[in-house]
Amino acid sequence: ATTLAGQTASLYGANNAGSQLPGKPNRVYWSKIGQPEAWPRINWLDVGSERRRVLAICATDRALYVFKENEGIFRIFGDSDETFDVEPVDLKYKPIAAETVVAFDKRVWALCDKGIVAVNEAGLEVMSNDIQEELLRALITSVTLADVATMAWALPYESESFCTFFLPGDRDI
């Protein structure tokens, strides 16, 4: 369940078990408020290109962020079903691994093709500048991007104020 506009609902990307429309990989669905098992077919938004699938969905207290494979990062915002809208946050950074998309420190963090980023309503910030060269080298030389996509993950530690990213390979960064 995710909270958006002060309401809790379940959200489904087109590749989740809840989808009945495999031809719409860019579609995001939401449930009735307070009824996570009930999601009418009219509760949806198309996000970005129809040719690119939703890789991950993650929320902050103000918006829902949609990470699309080979396309970029989008934001869904609004106060109700009638006012939900979608806008691109950044189309230059392409998310790589769904399990690295995590909510932390009032932002959503993710591993992208150009580094680790954090997004919120203010925009995108590259968080891996200090380790950028080593990170990109590890992504290029240690394993294939397909391995990174399926094996990388992140774990936020709010109480300790840090977020750890775990990548496949034999290198420490």
Image (spheres, rainbow, N blue to C red):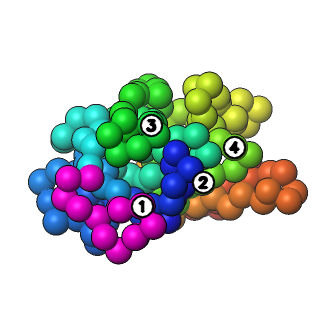
Q: Which residue is mark 2?
A: 102
Mark 4 or mark 3, whichever is nearer to me: 3
Q: Is residue 132 above or below residue 60?
A: above
- Where disc 2 sits, the SS reads strand
Mark nearer the N terminus (3 vs 2): 3
Report, in whole angstroms, how far the alpha carbon at label 2 lies from the one at label 1.
23 Å
- Where disc 4 sits, the SS reads loop
- Where disc 1 sits, the SS reads loop
Mark nearer the N terminus (2 vs 1): 1
Report, in whole angstroms, how far the alpha carbon at label 4 lies from the one at label 3.
18 Å
Part of the protein shown in magenta: 31-43
Name the residue: 45% across, 52% down: 57
Q: Which residue is mark 4?
A: 106
Q: Is residue 147 above or below residue 58?
A: below
The answer to whether mark 2 and mark 1 are in CB contact below 8 A is no
Mark 2 or mark 1, whichever is nearer to me: 1
94 horizontally vs 163: left or right: left
Q: Which residue is mark 1?
A: 33
Q: Mark number for residue 78? A: 3
Name the quadrant containing residue 72. top left
Q: Main secondary structure of the magenta part?
A: loop
Name the residue: 43% across, 53% down: 56
The three-letter code of the residue at mark 2 reads Val
Mark nearer the N terminus (4 vs 3): 3
The three-letter code of the residue at mark 3 reads Gly
Q: Is residue 40 magenta?
A: yes
Mark 4 neighbour class, 10 Å CA radius: few under 14, some 14 to 19, many 20 or more: some
